[in-house]
Amino acid sequence: DHHAEQISAGSKALVDLMNQYADPSARQRHIDAIDAIEKAADKYTHETVALLHKTFITPFDRETTHQLISEMDDILDLIQDVAESAMLYDLQRATPEALQLAELNQMCCERVKAAVNLLSSMENAEQILKICHEIDRLESDADRVMRSAMSKLFRDEADVRQLIKLKAIYELLEAVSDKCEDVANTIEGVV
């Protein structure tokens, strides 16, 4: 649950970054926030794995628990990759498509948080599965947005360096929704 909270916070910070990307001081503030959130989530990942090694009976399969926390950690690693790559590539502007992908990721991450929070009771199974299906739908939406963004990019962007930078950012943004879908698939397996 604590890690899922960090995923939600990281996705919100990513949307804020894309919204305020033109302002260098706001940009750095959001990148720093994402970095701090990812570090906090790493702490929860390590605590979870340590508890797995100490706990004789786990609420569900030990390997599945490890897989779930690892996949959740991958979500925030990718969010951090987006922020750091934008800075390292000296990206000068965030496109509407990048913002749209970040917003879809935030919706996916909010649903990951909701599904994880409901895992404490299998009485929530129907609701959990519904959320997992929503994540799948949002991931498909992100695929469509990315394909459209790539098409526009290759059609309209004359600066090859800018094209390469944006292509990499779009791919990283779309990978976040893919990881959310991986988490949803693991949760469906648990249910």
Image (cartoon, rainbow, N blue to C red):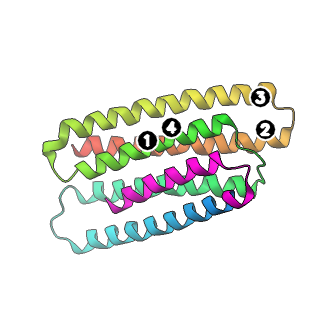
- Counting residues from the N terminus, which is met first, the one under dot 1 or under dot 3? 1
Residue type for callout 3: Phe
Q: Earlier in the sequence, mark 2 or mark 4?
A: 4
Q: Residues within 10 Å of mark 3 (few under 14, many from 20)?
A: few
Q: Position of residue 28 (x, y in %)?
A: 68, 62
Q: Are marks 1 and 4 in contact (CB under 8 Å)?
A: yes
Q: Which residues are magenta?
A: 1-26
The residue carrying mark 2 is: 163
Image quarter of residue 189: top left
Task: Tell me what residue is drawn at x 43 percent, y 52 percent.
Answer: 8
Q: Is residue 102 above or below residue 54?
A: above
Q: Are marks 2 and 4 in contact (CB under 8 Å)?
A: no
> What is the spatial separation of the Cα atoms under label 2 and label 4, in whole angstroms?
22 Å
Residue drawn at 85 percent across, 38 percent down: 160
Where residue 76 sits in the image (x, y, percent)? 49, 56
User: Which residue position holds label 3?
Assistant: 154
Label 2: state its secondary structure: helix
Picture residue at 76% right of the left edge, 53% below the top:
89
**What's the CA distance linking mark 1 and mark 4?**
6 Å
Mark 3 and mark 2 residues within 8 Å of each other at the beta carbon: yes
Closer to the chain start, of discs 2 and 1, is 1
Foreground of the two, 25 or 93: 25
Three-letter amino acid code of the residue under disc 2: Leu
Looking at the rendered structure, the kind of residue marked 1 is Cys
Q: CA distance from mark 2 to mark 1?
A: 26 Å
Which residue bears the numbered disc 1? 108
In the picture, the disc for residue 104 is 4
